[in-house]
Image: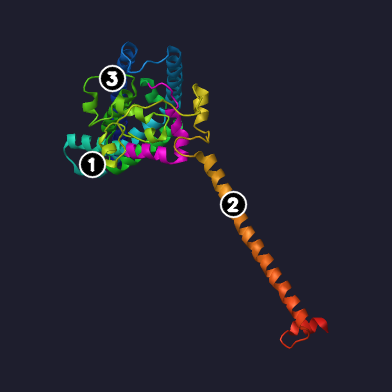
Amino acid sequence: MLNELKSSTTLLQSYLTWAVNLSAGGVAAYILLLCFSLFLMVEFCEPREKVLPKQLRQSYRANIGLFTFNSVVMSTVAVPALLMLAEQCSGKGLLNHIHNPLGKIVLSFVAIDLLLYCLHKACHRFDCLWMIHKVHHSDPCLNVSTAFRIHFLEIVIINLVKAIAVVVLGIEGLLLVVNEAIIIFFTMLHHANISFRGERFLGWVIITPYLHRVHHSVRRDQHDRNYGAVLSIWDRLFGTLAVLKPEQIGVNGSSAQDLISLLKCGFTLTDSSPAGPGLKAYYKAARDWLKAKIGIIGSVCAKGWIIRKWRGAMKIMHIALQGKNRKYPLYRKQMN
């Protein structure tokens, strides 16, 4: 009876902790909504780059539509699952050996930010990941809503990476909510079409709008730069930082500018993939290479066959000219 009571108490405590974390997440969501509205007003009043109103409306419509779809499909699964996982792993990971709360916050944030940097870089290196990630890059006019232009499959991958961090580090639920809020805030910041004083100075530590615009260039040598989610030190450390103005924003050959097209875009292979030749082109090149190899081998074999036949014919002609000879028993057998 006592064990059952303890079990029920533990379950109730876990549920209450999860509910508190959800409440904290709700507060963070309101704060982020306020920040989004602030960035939106600054974009309208003092934009960094002039954008056609029609193009901007199309971008907002597509991005908000995709965000709504992702919220309905993913939020009911991904967020509660991460929070419950965080509660289960609380006090069991590497952070359990650190007793300073501030140290836990800093280390967990740095670890997650580094993981997101590595994942982002992988999305530009592997065609199977770029196929999904290119949805985010397909916005031709960068603005604060572009931060939420993410395919739901990419959200699944991101949450799986975060789940690994939660398990290994033992990140608590409240700490996870704080980290998520910080990352989302800075993601909105460096996608916003704004400029401010001290931006280049802050760029030594964090990814700012002028640094992230390069990442959305149509040119591969420009958009394969500045992968950081929050901190720019990873790009400086691994040599992927670039400080320059992009020629054009978006993805070459992409016309996905509505919800349905964006969802389909995540499953579409493109021959002109900025991350590389694309899967279609890759397999086509491999197929062409294989055909060429087979052709070369066939040609060599054919030449060898012709040479062997030629040598055989020359041998028979030589035997015929020599007449019966002890050296050629095969000839004697054939002639007899």
User: Can you identify the residue that label 2 sits on?
Assistant: 292
Residue segment shown in magenta? 115-142
User: How packed is label 3: few (under 14 Cα within 10 Å), some, or many (20 or more)?
Assistant: some
Q: Amino acid at mark 2?
A: Ala
Query: Where is residue 301 shown, x and y percent of the image?
Result: 64, 62
**In front: 117, or 285?**
285
Q: Quadrant of residue 182?
A: top left
* Residue 19 visible: no
User: Can you identify the residue that label 3 sits on?
Assistant: 195
At horizontal 31% and vertical 36% (from top left) the residue drawn is 86
The quadrant in which the C terminus is found is bottom right
Q: Secondary structure at mark 3?
A: loop
Which one is earlier in the sequence, the residue at label 3 or at label 2?
3
Which one is earlier in the sequence, the residue at label 1 or at label 2?
1
Q: Of tags 3 and 2, which is closer to the observer? A: 2
Q: Is residue 123 magenta?
A: yes
Q: Of tags 3 and 1, which is closer to the observer? A: 3
Q: Residue furthest front?
A: 321
**In front: 74, or 137?**
137
User: Can you identify the residue that label 1 sits on?
Assistant: 95
| Left/right of residue 287 with respect to residue 9 in the rendered view | right
The prevailing secondary structure element of the residues shown in magenta is helix
Query: Where is residue 113 shown, x and y percent of the image?
Result: 29, 36
